[in-house]
Image (cartoon, rainbow, N blue to C red):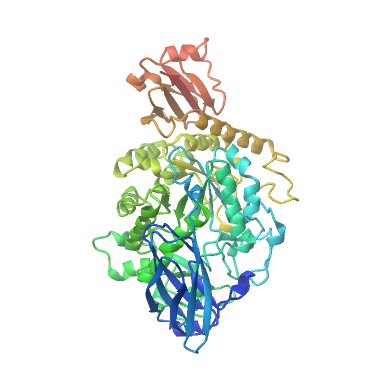
Amino acid sequence: MWALVLATLSFSFSAFGTRELPVRMDPPNWWVGMPGNSVELLVETLRQEPIASVTLTQGEGVRILKDEAAQNAVYHYVTLVIEPSAPAQTLVFTIKTKKGRTYSHSYPLEARDASRRSHMGLDSRDLIYLVTPDRFANGNPANDQVRGLQEQTLDRSEGYQRHGGDLQGLTDHLDYIASLGATAVWTMPVLVNDMPRASYHGYAITDHYRVDPRFGGHAAYKAYAKALHAKDMKLVMDMVPNHIGTAHRFYQNPPDSNWINAWPGRPETDKNGEVGEPIITNHRYATLYDPYAAPSDQQQFTDGWFVSSMVDVNQRDRHCAQYLIQNALWWIESIGVDAFRVDTWIYPDQNFLNQWSTAIHAVYPEFFIFSESWVHNEHSQQYFLDRHPTLDGAADFMMYQAWKEALEKPTTWNGGLNHFYMNLAADYLYREPENFMVFLDNHDEGRFFAKVKEDKDLYKMGLAMLYTMRGIPCLYYGTEVLMKAENDHGAMRQDFYGGWPDDAKNAFTGEGLTADEAEALAFVRELAELRKAHPVIGTGALRQWAPYNDVYAYSWSNDEEVLLVMVNRNANAQYFDLNRMGDWLNNVSTPKVLLTTKPAGVPVFPDGLQAEVEMGIYYMAPNGVTILGYRK
């Protein structure tokens, strides 16, 4: 079947605005002094000439260990050994083809830059800002449309077409992002997506070594990384090891048919980049741990395609696996990436993922990897964490569901705030739950403000909990100014206010925002200052109190202070009995109100707060949040 696909496309660099060369090598460069002292080059003749041999004709302290022909004769796998003493240099290879032609190819072997590793890793004091780059800000209109790429349409009124946002626009507004408390920025994928439709989202990668020129290309990504690090912020890269776009040369002209899972019945692509009769995954992740799972169900889950335009990659092939591992290392070393968010973690071969993350940590021990393990119960979340000892964290979909229960539904014995309480109690299942990425909304699930029916009190309640809960909080761009699109991916990834010159309102400057939007933005910034001023959040001892009368409380404590967060999810005023804190209130000062989402308005004691505290009772407004700070 794959031979039919080979005839459909001859890959060319010219599609990316780069002069066509007769030979391509991936990775496009490597470094001296890398642990492991070896790299496997994927050598390809771009004129589709079968390769006879690859030899190294210039190189000091470097030798070819193996020159191996791929099943597809236009590719070779060439393993280099790089001695620890080898200097930075330009290697020269000679590629001989079976047609008798000889090509010379220069290959950079560079010195490593230690500064690109100076910000590496994430922890519970970080806060991530999630961005759809095409929809945030258009910093360079000149790259909105690039000749040679399939999708040329630019239409901001259409959710699935490109809007023109880019890395320059993101770089220009890092101060704004930092003002929200963010210490790290996670963008949806920025690599080339030369797909005919919906290329804006980035998840159908068509070249693993090129930043999409519509985002500004490699130079813009490098400048963005440098600007982040200059502000002591971190770069989170979205990695996609599970699938590629159908326009990728690895589908159109793969090194080996074994690189692709579940070849479709009709492999030719249509005008939308879709193929006919693919096997689609059944999404049944339980087949990976179900002791009674049918093998056919498990195979369909792992090998089935996500959609008919996204090709499922076979990481069980050793060369494919090595390609993906080296690609991850290359981006870290080349750009200075500080953490990976890994798309659709539960779908690739699980043994490969262990190999992949172990290899990354062998080179970069401080690097942070967190997964998108989109599951629906705690034991599944535990399984995927325990299955991967070198996985640092996970997107906490269980806490996301718990927040939906607590903020979208009334509190019952098992529901609402009690559901959230029980979810946090399940942390005993996990190693290092403080490394979980926690969120109220994201690029797949729609806007939080819409999900709470545009209730400002519940909005503030959710944001206050997000900024003070265990884990690494993640704020989806636009949530801070009450964006409210949901139920459609193209719509919920909407253009940020002020990212384009003709926008009617501008969140960066505040111009044109409604009173409610300005209030929300100010509240998020207040939370950012609170989180910054109280490092006990995320680092101290965490304790929670079971909900009574729709009031839930939790606290952070260390040797210096206690910070108490109280949430009233009732439409009436309620109280929290401070005496429930027990010995945590010994030898502490009278509390200071650090934040309240609305005035209490409950005149219970004529002397106000002090009288309430002395009586051991703190009264709270309907659907309100209050944060108290005690000094020890």
Residue 624 x, y percent position in the rendering: 51, 29
Q: Residue furthest right?
A: 502
Residue 415 in percent (x, y) is at: 39, 40
Left or right: 488 as drawn, with respect to 165? left
Give the position of the N terminus as an image quadrant. Answer: bottom left
Report the front residue among 321 and 396. 321
**Which residue is rendered at x = 54% and y = 22% of the image?**
600
Image point (45%, 85%), residue name: 3
Q: How many marks?
A: 0
Q: Where does the image place residue 364, in percent across and percent down from the top left?
A: 40, 51
What percent of the width, then of the height, locates residue 45? Answer: 51, 79
Of 413 and 126, the residue lying toward us:
126
| Above or below, 459 relative to 300 | above
Query: In this view, which residue lies farthest toward the left?
Result: 291
Q: What residue is at 46 percent from the left and 60 percent from the top?
A: 87
In the rendered image, the residue lying farthest to the top is: 607
Q: Residue at x 45, y 28 (%)?
A: 565
- Using the rendered image of the protein, determine whether residue 163 is visible from the camera's viewpoint: yes
Q: Nearer the viewer, residue 237 or 549?
A: 237
Q: Which quadrant would residue 39 be assigned to in this image?
A: bottom left
Q: Quadrant of the C terminus?
A: top left
> Which image quarter: residue 146?
bottom right
